[in-house]
Image (tube, grey):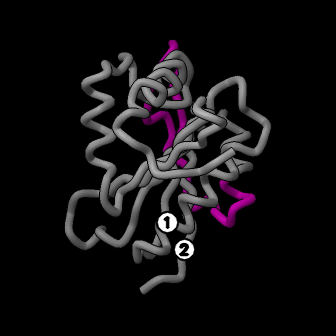
Amino acid sequence: MHIRTARLTDAEAIRGIYNRAILTVATFDLEPRSLEEQQRWLALRSGAHIALVADDGGALAGFASLSPYRDRPAYRTTVENSVYVDGSYQGKGVGRQLMTGLVDTARDHGFHSMIARIVSSNAPSIALHRGLGFEIVGVEKEVGRKLGKWLDVVVMQRMLGVG
């Protein structure tokens, strides 16, 4: 498994992984992304707010990304992460490899803090983040509604030791 920076040519594979996640509560998006939307999303992740992919000999096993935490200037040193692993690769350490690369990249880009917002029923993602030094800093109660259920979000944070 090779962790590398995502390329525009990865858009279709990333879209496939993400659109499958839309069928679950792993993301709060409700509508599948088009290829054009995925390409635009990927184009926005070409600087400090990067996307990484797990490349298994040409097949994408998953992706992870950094996004701005908030749009006000004082939040610039904090990023929010996302990580999605294709179902056939889950439980094989792909998420850990992606997140390790993402934490290192965030630190290298000078970010001070990383935030993860995870639906409370996603125990594997919470455990992954905890295992990488993230701590639960709060729970947002019933902030989303999907698949006929109210969803809580666990907020986790890792300090990166920069700045």
Q: Earlier in the sequence, mark 2 or mark 1?
A: 1
Residue at the spot of label 2: 159
> Which residue is nearer to you in this view: 127 or 4?
4
Determine the residue positioned at 76% across, 45% down.
Answer: 93
- Direction top: furthest residue: 148
Determine the residue positioned at 56% across, 68% down.
Answer: 104
- Count the marks: how many? 2
Q: Marks 2 and 1: which is nearer the front? A: 1
Q: Residues within 10 Å of mark 2 (few under 14, many from 20)?
A: some
138 over 141 or under it: above or below: below
> Which residue is nearer to you in this view: 115 or 93?
93
- Percent across and percent down for residue 102 are 54, 58
Q: Could you tell me how far apart the alpha carbons at marks 2 and 1 are, in whole angstroms? A: 13 Å
Q: In the image, what residue type sits under mark 1?
A: Thr
Give the main secondary structure, helix, strand or loop, of the magenta stretch. Answer: strand
Q: In the image, what residue type sits under mark 2?
A: Met
- Percent across and percent down for residue 31 are 36, 16
Residue at the spot of label 1: 105
- Percent across and percent down for residue 116 are 52, 52
The residues colored magenta run: 129-153
